[in-house]
Image (cartoon, rainbow, N blue to C red):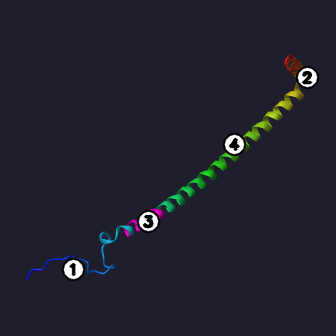
Amino acid sequence: MTTVNTPERANRGSATGRSPTHQPATDRLREQAREVTQELQEMGNTASDAVRENLGKLQDQASECYEQGRDQAYQAEHTFEQFIKDHPLKSMLIAAGVGVLLGRFWIRR
């Protein structure tokens, strides 16, 4: 006796016993969309963590550069004050010369 698979016999399986290839296309598409959404959320979280880490590093570097700049400005100020104390006449003549030059440029405008 030979049996032939008729469409009735092929469709007898329960819906839960179906393999993924026999699921309706909309169900497969919905499941794939859910998986893609989860992966995108994970990627977003990873990217967010990376940005936070890099932002922290940049803040540390900016603070360090600020500190170095402040120290250099303080040293320049100290050096300038020391020059004025060591050479008061020369400092006055330089200041007068700069004043004259700035005055000439100011008048021309």
Q: Nearer the viewer, mark 3 or mark 1?
A: 1
Residue 7 drawn at (x, y percent): 21, 76
Q: Residue at x 72, y 43 (%)?
A: 66
Q: Amino acid at mark 2?
A: Met
**Segment colored magenta:** 27-38
Q: Nearer the viewer, mark 4 or mark 3?
A: 3
Q: Amino acid at mark 4?
A: Cys
The earlier-in-sequence mark between 4 and 3 is 3
Q: Which mark is residue 9?
A: 1
For disc 4, the marked residue is 65
Q: CA distance from mark 3 to mark 1?
A: 33 Å
Q: Inspect the magenta stretch and tell me whether residue 36 lies in it.
A: yes
Q: CA distance from mark 4 to mark 3?
A: 45 Å
* Image quarter (top left, top right, bottom left or bottom right) of the C terminus: top right
Q: Amino acid at mark 3?
A: Glu
Q: Which mark is residue 35?
A: 3
Q: Amino acid at mark 1?
A: Arg
Q: CA distance from mark 2 to mark 3?
A: 77 Å
